[in-house]
Image (cartoon, helix red, strand yellow):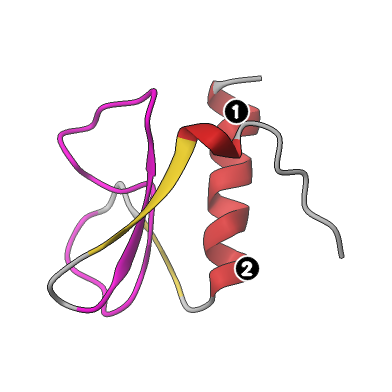
């Protein structure tokens, strides 16, 4: 499986105090809300919660394809 990484220079991984990892787009400011989150879920219907790093990267790819073609 290969992943197109075009545009990922505008995506960053952000760790938090709960040992989770969020995925943020540098071009879309949503008040610090991540696009996706790997870790124990918190209540937020606008965040995609995943259980693996490949799933987290897929969230980033989907965001880039939909919002920044």
Q: Residues within 10 Å of mark 1 (few under 14, many from 20)?
A: few
The reply, left or right, for residue 18 in relation to residue 54 is left
The reply, left or right, for residue 49 in relation to residue 1 is left
Residue situated in front as seen by the camera: 37 or 44:
37
Which secondary structure is most common in the magenta stretch?
A: loop
How far across and down, in percent of the image, does residue 46 sit?
30, 46
The reply, left or right, for residue 2 in relation to residue 59 is right
Image point (42%, 46%), residue name: 12
Count of numbered marks = 2
- Report, in whole angstroms, how far the alpha carbon at label 1 lies from the one at label 2: 18 Å
Image point (21%, 56%), residue name: 44
Indicate whether residue 3 is drawn in magenta: no
Asked where in the image residue 54 lies, by quadrant, the reply is bottom right
Compared with 21, 7 (above or below) is: above
The residue tagged 2 is 54
The reply, left or right, for residue 27 in relation to residue 64 is left
Q: Residue furthest front?
A: 9
The residue tagged 1 is 66
Residue situated in front as seen by the camera: 16 or 59:
16
Asked where in the image residue 17 lies, by quadrant, the reply is bottom left
Compared with 47, 21 (above or below) is: below
Specify the segment rendered in magenta: 19-44
Secondary structure of the residue carrying numbered label 1? helix
How far across and down, in percent of the image, does residue 38 sit?
39, 71
């Amino acid at each position: 499986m290969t992943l197109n990484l075009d545009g990922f220079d505008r995506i960053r991984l952000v760790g938090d105090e709960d040992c989770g990892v969020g995925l943020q787009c540098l071009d879309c400011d949503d008040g610090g809300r991540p696009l996706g989150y790997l870790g124990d879920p918190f209540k937020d219907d606008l965040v995609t919660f995943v259980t693996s790093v490949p799933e987290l990267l897929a969230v980033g790819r989907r965001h880039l394809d939909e919002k920044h073609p």
